[in-house]
Amino acid sequence: MIRPLLFTSALALAVLPAASVLAQSTPAPAAATGTQAPAAAFTLPALPYAFDALDPAIDAETMQIHHGRHHKAYVDNLNAAVAADPALAGLAIEDLLGRVSTLPAAVRNNGGGHWNHSLFWTLLTPVGQGGEPSPELSAAITRDFGSMEAFKTAFNQAATTRFGSGWAWLIVADGKLQITSTPNQDNPLMDLAEVRGAPVLAVDVWEHAYYLKYQNKRADYLTAFWTVVNWDSVNRLYADAQ
Ligand code: MN3
């Protein structure tokens, strides 16, 4: 199979703390399962905190619906798409994303949705518990954006100007930090992404991520987002991407 150089399975595991839950389970031998339905390939990871842990930045009802309905739907629909094509059985999510341009749209939309949300949950943490950018990350931000303030302004700009639904990303590509955004559930691991790289920070700007509390005020959601960023996770992802 063709794999992008930057995203070996080993790196993908290192990049994404939730990767263990992203692995497809090994199909049980048919003889042993009898009439049982096969186990679902991908599973919904548990949130690493309570639904109300991000309050007041992100309210509990939004988190419950976002995780329990939206993310779960991506998992269920991805499993259905993979089950429909025996050639995809057992493949890691990163392998699917790396050649997603050759696969059905259901894999692109739901595989992206599953990977993006699995990462996103780990990038958030209760107010006051997120730590600070590491000296290494801070130095790279200053090098590539001028200052932390300039970085946040540029990231917010990418997030607010993403028309409709999508994501804004901080990635490492060619040894440098870059900001990019993707439509829908696309991400920088996909072979069809305009800008490819290793994600270290991301924000979901679909309305389902913020509409209950912020309605159409995406900028206010972004202001709140910065108060719940888990810099310890971001630092780790940055270190792993080097
Ligand atoms: Mn979402």
Image: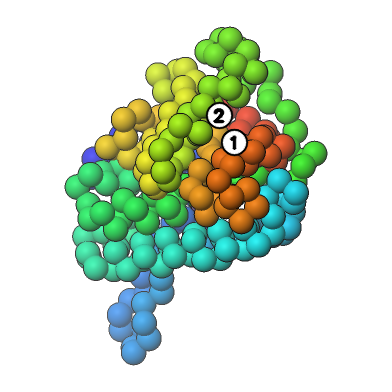
Classify mark 2: residues with Cα within 10 Å, few (<14), some (14-19) or many (20+): many
Q: Secondary structure at mark 2?
A: helix
Is 223 rendered above or below residue 79?
above
Check the image and tell me how it is coloured: rainbow
Q: Which mark is residue 219?
A: 1
Q: Is residue 144 above or below residue 94?
A: above
Residue at (22, 52) in percent of width and height: 103
Residue 221 horizontal/vertical position (percent): 62, 41
Residue at x 48% of width, y 29% of height: 158
Q: Position of residue 8 (x, y in %)?
A: 38, 38
**Can you tell which of label 1 and label 2 is closer to the viewer?**
1
Q: Are marks 1 and 2 in contact (CB under 8 Å)?
A: yes
Give the CA separation, mark 1 to mark 2.
8 Å
Q: Amino acid at mark 2?
A: Asn
Q: Among all residues in the image, which is located at the extreme front?
A: 216
| Residue projecting furthest to the bottom | 35
Instruction: Return the x and y of residue 43 as percentages of the image width and height.
Output: 48, 64
SS of the residue under disc 1: helix
Residue 71 badge: none
Q: Can you see residue 135?
A: yes
For the N terminus, the image quarter is top left
Q: On the rendered structure, is 185 left or right of 226? A: left
Drawn side of residue 197 relative to residue 124, left or right: left
Q: Would you name the residue on which mark 2 appears? A: 156
